[in-house]
Image: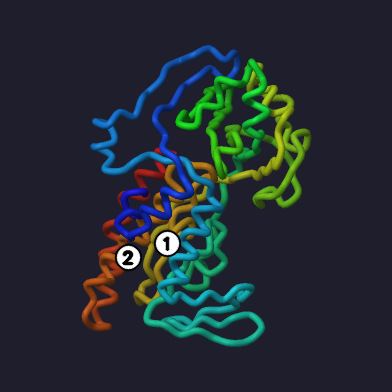
Amino acid sequence: MTKALQDWGLGPSLKEISHRCALYRMQNGCNGDFIGCVSFTEAILDNFLADLVFLRHGDFHSMLYEASLALGVRFLFNSEVADVAPDSTKVTLRGGGALQGDVVVIADGYNSSVRPLAMGGSEYVAGDEKSLFVTFEVPIDVIRLDKELASLAEPSAWQIWFGDEHLVNGNVLGVNNSDFTISIVQKTVALDLEDEEEWRPRSVAELGLEDLNLEPRLAKLLRLARNVYGKVFRARPPVESLVSDDASYVLVGEAAHPMPPISHHSVALAVEDAQTLGLLFSRIKRKDQISRMLNAYEEIRQPRISAALTYE
């Protein structure tokens, strides 16, 4: 992903909001025992063709938004899509008004409401099994002052804990490395949360995190947690097609590949989608070439998306 951002000329902006990951350290999530460590040497990064970096999702979003504004992109906020015209690129907005283009890019997330309207299919059918995803923060100053936690304050380290039906990631983030951010993934849960598939502030008790078998440092971090957000995720099957039959609509981002939150591929796949579309559309000379380029997009992206979904 960082390679694509550099290709777009966003390298300097990315450097301002991120810092480099130099290693990841693996530990037992139940007792804290050290498992192993991988250092990202120059030789490894040369094969990646780009640095591995830490950055906040909100900062990343703001960077792309500001870059888009500078290029003349027009944003319409609070403009919900009410309908799309079959065999057309006309989009009707709720409350009145319509938009017309050469192609409609659908990028409204894994619970996409526009995809069924445009692609002639039904809503995603979610599986029955629930997984829990949680994020929270602890001020880095609090961690540095705690003898038991101080070793976690290394800015360049990606901490990973493998537990009993749970996985925990932790790393330093924020302006001036101000926070230690933790994400928890619990494989199978039987929670009954209000608006369970919405990211929203929730209490530790509501999320059932007190019942997890966590090593002492993780348990302490949980007691110190602030800005706790959580949601339930139900797996969705891969979409059958990324492009409508008449090549009027194309799926990108999580509307095209409904990935679990906090996954290793979700944001990167969306950036890859955009880069692929951009490279293909930069070669268009005539309007009648659009359908050919969209079909090429699907041929290129579907194998990559399928492999990423299988990995996750």
Foreground pick, 172 / 187: 172
User: How many numbered marks, from 0 up?
Assistant: 2
The Cα atoms of the two marked residues, 2 and 1, are separated by 9 Å
Badge 1 crowding class, 10 Å Cα cut-off, few under 14, some 14 to 19, many 20 or more, is many
Q: Is 32 on the left or on the right of 283, as rendered?
A: right
Q: Is 248 on the left or on the right of 280, as rendered?
A: right
Foreground pick, 66 / 261: 66
Residue depicted at 61% across the width and 76% down the height: 79
Q: Is 230 on the left or on the right of 10, as rendered?
A: right
Badge 2 crowding class, 10 Å Cα cut-off, few under 14, some 14 to 19, many 20 or more, is some
Foreground pick, 133 / 153: 153
Does 124 appear above or below 143?
Answer: below
The kind of residue tagged 2 is Leu
Q: Is 95 on the left or on the right of 257, as rendered?
A: right
> Pointers 2 and 1 in contact (CB under 8 A)?
yes
Q: Which residue lies under the disc numbered 2?
A: 277
Residue depicted at 31% across the width and 49% down the height: 3
Q: How far across and down, in percent of the image, does residue 13 sit?
A: 42, 55
Q: Which residue lies under the disc numbered 1?
A: 252
Q: What element does badge 2 sit on?
A: helix
